[in-house]
């Protein structure tokens, strides 16, 4: 589904600043407010945008053509003086059956999938996002001489925050007279018509809003920005213009993290085994905007390059990461996960923050569920033993020599770009191809986390001062049986695959329940998952549909590159 962003106004009250640039390109913390808005939608899985431009629209168009964002952009130019409603009417052919509508100079953090589900269930023509008016004591009105004319004690009032979900059919049958009304008036009259028809719905938004119309409000927006993204205690670090090193940055989770860091304005370096875009396909979309560093954690000599880089922040994700195969590759698993981590820590020590990405697998055998951080780990695979050894080394560096280290234990991840060896990716691909699904009885439960939810936690751990020295679970805390997962994916893909659940025996030493206690992440970081399982599965399935179309179609540009005739 597309998002239409209104970004064509002049921003007259911000002159002379807006004499040079359009208001949506005014920077907050080093990036245009419009880019922050777009990035917030991308993080929630919405990657198609229609930008309704006007005043200095060519600058906005050029900016998004040159900025590396994992998204598609279309532009609609209705002229500098067009009203909001006229801009939407002009863009209707680009927006699909329904679209989110946002203002390019306003930041809010709405739960978009939840709002979409509510809108679809209601059958409304438009759902507007609203917030409560802050009035702790009472609402006062007064005349021109400041004599109070009314007072209401703690009235329950809400206001429109400049965000809505709209059915395109509203624009198709619009009264042309509304388009000619001054800016804002046409929208007010349209809302009035929908209210009379009981077709205008409200979606309550409890969070903050950042916008500005004057230089003074811009100063306040700069101060509010940190609290907007880090509600649980603020941040001591901003990622903009920071030197950030990511080990394992070309992997599944690491590539999502690197993309977010680039969007945040960080100077991103990625530790890779081979300095070649062909060998790091997940980060091809922003390869020109990172610095690849060819190195191997098992080779301390290769890590000397980090001294020259002098990163401010390090995310350590690189690992031997296959649980089952680690029983066959014990030496490699231990060399990478334990010794490789120690090599990294000893290669460079002048960082402002190092985030060690551990794993929920370190818990292993536990007497109670959900798993809490204070539980004693009992890892049950060479992979998990190696990761726990790396975790202990990280914690030792904090407690012994006071290094600013954070340990995160993410639970099962899924999402776009995941390897088909992972259970959700494997099930989706088989269902889309119509192949038989053969499993155990599927009684064991796991929790599954959309990858962008986990990256939210990574970013918070890198910037929240209270996170230093802590071990923190990152997980949704919702158990799902493998049997239920199979049936969900089968239904969501509308698959013709035959389900053969129960034909495989249970694995020896199976962990029957695995689930996170995430209270610490909520309280310390202000983190909570924004995309639930069904929403995340739908986003992931659509990505794999596109992936298979490119990978399986013999006539696709991707497959054509492998034909000898294309390079002989």
Image: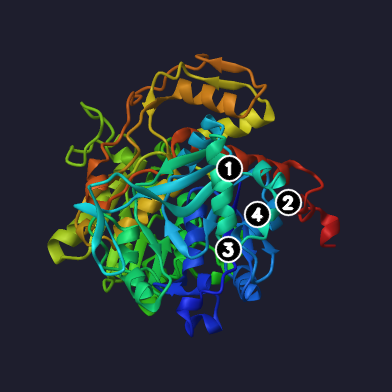
| Quarter location, residue 442 | top left
Question: At x 68% / y 30%, what residue is drawn?
Answer: 433
Disc 4 target residue = 178
Query: Quick check: marks 2 and 4 in contact, CB under 8 Å?
Result: no
Q: Which mark is residue 193?
A: 1
Residue 518: x %, y % from top left: 27, 40
Distance of mark 2 from mark 4, alpha carbons? Answer: 19 Å
Left/right of residue 239 with respect to residue 468 in the rendered view: right
**In this rendering, does residue 340 appear at all?**
no
1 vs 2, front mark: 1
Q: Is residue 356 above or below residue 274?
A: above
Dot 4, crowdedness within 10 Å: few (<14), some or many (≥20)?
some
Disc 3 target residue = 183
Q: Which mark is residue 93?
A: 2
* Label 3 element class: loop
Which circle's residue, 2 or 4, is located before the other in the chain?
A: 2
Which circle's residue, 3 or 2, is located before the other in the chain?
A: 2
Which circle's residue, 3 or 4, is located before the other in the chain?
A: 4
3 vs 2, front mark: 3
């Amino acid at each position: 589904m597309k998002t239409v962003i209104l970004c064509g106004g002049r921003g007259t009250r911000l002159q002379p600043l807006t004499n040079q640039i359009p208001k949506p390109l005014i920077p907050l913390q080093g990036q245009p407010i419009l880019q922050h808005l777009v990035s917030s939608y991308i993080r929630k899985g919405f990657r198609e945008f229609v930008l309704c431009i006007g005043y200095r629209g060519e600058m906005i168009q050029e900016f998004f053509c040159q900025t590396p964002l994992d998204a598609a952009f279309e532009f609609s130019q209705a002229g500098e003086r067009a009203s909001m409603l006229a801009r939407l009417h002009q863009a209707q052919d680009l927006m699909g059956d329904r679209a989110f509508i946002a203002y390019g100079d306003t930041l809010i953090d709405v739960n978009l999938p939840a709002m979409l589900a509510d809108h679809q269930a209601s059958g409304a023509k438009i759902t507007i996002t609203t917030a409560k008016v802050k009035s702790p004591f009472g609402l006062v009105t007064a005349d021109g001489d400041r004599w109070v004319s009314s007072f209401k004690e703690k009235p329950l009032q809400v206001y429109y925050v400049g965000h809505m979900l709209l059915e395109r059919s509203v624009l198709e049958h619009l009264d042309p007279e509304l388009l000619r009304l001054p800016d804002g008036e046409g929208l007010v009259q349209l809302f009035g018509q929908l209210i009379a028809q009981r077709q205008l719905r409200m979606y309550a938004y409890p969070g903050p809003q950042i916008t500005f119309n004057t230089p003074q409000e811009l100063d306040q927006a700069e101060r509010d920005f940190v609290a907007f993204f880090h509600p649980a205690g603020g941040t001591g670090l901003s990622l903009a213009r920071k030197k950030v090193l990511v080990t394992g940055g070309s992997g599944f989770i690491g590539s999502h993290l690197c993309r977010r860091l680039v969007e945040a304005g960080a100077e991103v370096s990625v530790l890779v085994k081979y300095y070649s875009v062909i060998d790091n396909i997940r980060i091809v979309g922003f390869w020109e905007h990172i610095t690849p560093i060819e190195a191997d954690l098992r080779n301390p000599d290769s890590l000397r390059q980090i001294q020259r880089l002098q990163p401010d922040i390090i995310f350590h994700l690189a690992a031997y990461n296959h649980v089952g195969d680690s029983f066959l590759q014990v030496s490699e698993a231990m060399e990478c996960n334990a010794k490789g981590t120690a090599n990294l820590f000893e290669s460079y020590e002048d960082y402002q923050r190092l985030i060690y990405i551990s794993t929920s697998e370190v818990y292993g055998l536990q007497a109670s569920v959900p798993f809490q951080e204070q539980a004693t780990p009992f890892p049950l695979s060479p992979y998990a033993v190696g990761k726990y050894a790396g975790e202990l080394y990280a914690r030792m560096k904090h407690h012994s020599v006071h290094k600013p280290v954070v340990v995160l234990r993410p639970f099962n991840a899924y999402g776009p770009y995941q390897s088909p060896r992972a259970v959700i990716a494997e099930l989706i691909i088989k269902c889309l191809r119509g192949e038989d699904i053969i499993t155990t009885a599927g009684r064991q439960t796991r929790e599954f986390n959309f990858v962008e939810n986990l990256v939210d936690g990574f970013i918070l751990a890198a910037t929240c001062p209270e996170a230093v020295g802590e071990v923190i679970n990152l997980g949704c805390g919702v158990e799902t049986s493998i049997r239920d997962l199979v049936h969900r994916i089968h239904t969501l893909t509308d698959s013709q695959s035959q389900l053969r659940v129960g034909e495989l025996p249970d694995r020896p030493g199976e962990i029957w329940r695995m689930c996170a206690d995430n209270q610490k992440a909520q309280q310390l970081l202000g983190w909570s998952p924004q995309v639930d399982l069904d929403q995340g599965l739908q986003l992931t399935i659509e990505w794999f549909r596109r992936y298979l179309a490119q990978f399986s179609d013999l006539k696709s540009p991707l497959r054509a590159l492998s034909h000898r005739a294309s390079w002989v």
